[in-house]
Structure formats: C-alpha cells, structure tokens
C-alpha cells in the first residue's frame, strides 16, 4: 500500500457484468482492491452503495474487523442499519488491514468515480 503521497488518488470503478444482478463497484488504490460491493440489480442501487461507502467510511464504529479461515484479515463496512455495504480484500496482517481502513477513511469521500457500466 502506498504512503500518503497524492500523486495517485483512490478511484471507484462501477461495472456491469452479465450476471443476474450485474452492477458492482470497487474502491481501488492503484490496482489494489480496498473494498468491493455485493451485486446489485439496478445501477442506481450500486450508485447508492458507492455513496454509502463514502459516508460510512468516515465512522469508526462501522468497520467490522474479521479474520478469514485461512488466517488473513479483512473488514466489512456497515451502514447505519447494519447492512454490509462493502467488504475489503484479504490482508496478510492486521496492520495492513488497519492501513487500508485509514486509506479508505481519508480518501473514499473524494474518490474519483469511473463509470464502466
């Protein structure tokens, strides 16, 4: 994960696939996924999900810290109603997970949205 330089900013990619619920988004740091969404039926719902991540990433209590069965670390970001609005990538250490949370907190509100849907 990069240091706090501003030469590269976080980006949100909104995509559409051939799935039954085709719309998804990812918050990226370069080519590394920080948070990904569930699948949505409607594009507007996915766009609302992006806004929910932007908003809820600013609230410390919305991060649910987890450990995967393989021993790697991740987090879920939850909305005020308790619904998961984003799930992180897997990280080798708790410190890497913490760095990803700090990055999401600082950059998600202003992340550039690229609409590929």
Image (spheres, rainbow, N blue to C red):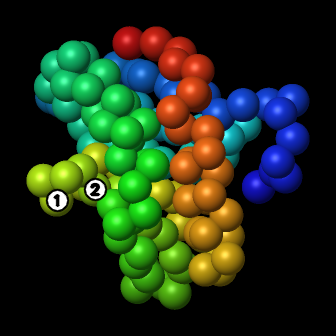
**Residue 27 higher or lower than 114, as above or below:** below
Secondary structure of the residue carrying tag 2 is strand
Q: Position of 63 compared to 91: left or right?
A: left
Q: Position of 31 compared to 18: left or right?
A: right
**Residue 52 higher or lower than 45, as above or below:** below
Q: Quadrant of residue 72?
A: bottom right
Q: CA distance from mark 1 to mark 2?
A: 5 Å
Q: Quadrant of residue 64?
A: bottom left
Secondary structure of the residue carrying tag 1 is loop
Pointers 1 and 2 in contact (C-beta within 8 Å): yes
Q: Position of 62 compared to 90: left or right?
A: left
Q: Residue at x 53, y 38 (%)?
A: 108
Q: Position of 11 compared to 54: left or right?
A: right
Q: Residue at x 83, y 33 (%)?
A: 6
Position in image of residue 70 (x %, y %): 48, 84
**Residue 94 higher or lower than 77, as above or below:** below
Residue in the foreground of this view, choosing between 59 and 49 = 59
**Residue 99 higher or lower than 54, as above or below:** below
Position in image of residue 37 (x %, y %): 34, 42
Q: Quadrant of residue 30?
A: top right
Residue 61 in view? yes
Residue in the foreground of this view, choosing between 59 and 34 = 59
Position in image of residue 16 (x %, y %): 34, 20
Q: Which circle marks residue 37 in the picture?
A: none
Position in image of residue 12 (x %, y %): 52, 28
Residue position marked by numbered label 1 in the rendering: 82
Where, quadrant-wise, is the N terminus in this rendering? bottom right
Where, quadrant-wise, is the C terminus in this rendering? top left
Q: Residue at x 31, y 37 (%)?
A: 52
Q: Residue at x 87, y 29 (%)?
A: 7
Q: Which circle marks residue 78 in the picture?
A: 2
């Amino acid at each position: 994960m990069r240091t706090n330089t501003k030469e590269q900013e976080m980006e949100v990619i909104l995509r559409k696939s051939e799935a039954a619920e085709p719309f998804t988004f990812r918050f990226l740091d370069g080519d590394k996924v920080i948070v990904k969404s569930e699948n949505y039926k409607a594009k507007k719902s996915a766009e609302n999900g992006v806004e929910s991540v932007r908003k809820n990433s600013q609230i410390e209590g919305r991060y649910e810290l987890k450990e995967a069965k393989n021993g790697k670390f991740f987090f879920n970001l939850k909305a005020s109603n308790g619904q998961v609005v984003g799930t992180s990538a897997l990280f080798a250490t708790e410190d890497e997970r913490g760095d990803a949370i700090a990055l999401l907190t600082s950059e998600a509100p202003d992340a550039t949205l690229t609409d590929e849907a």
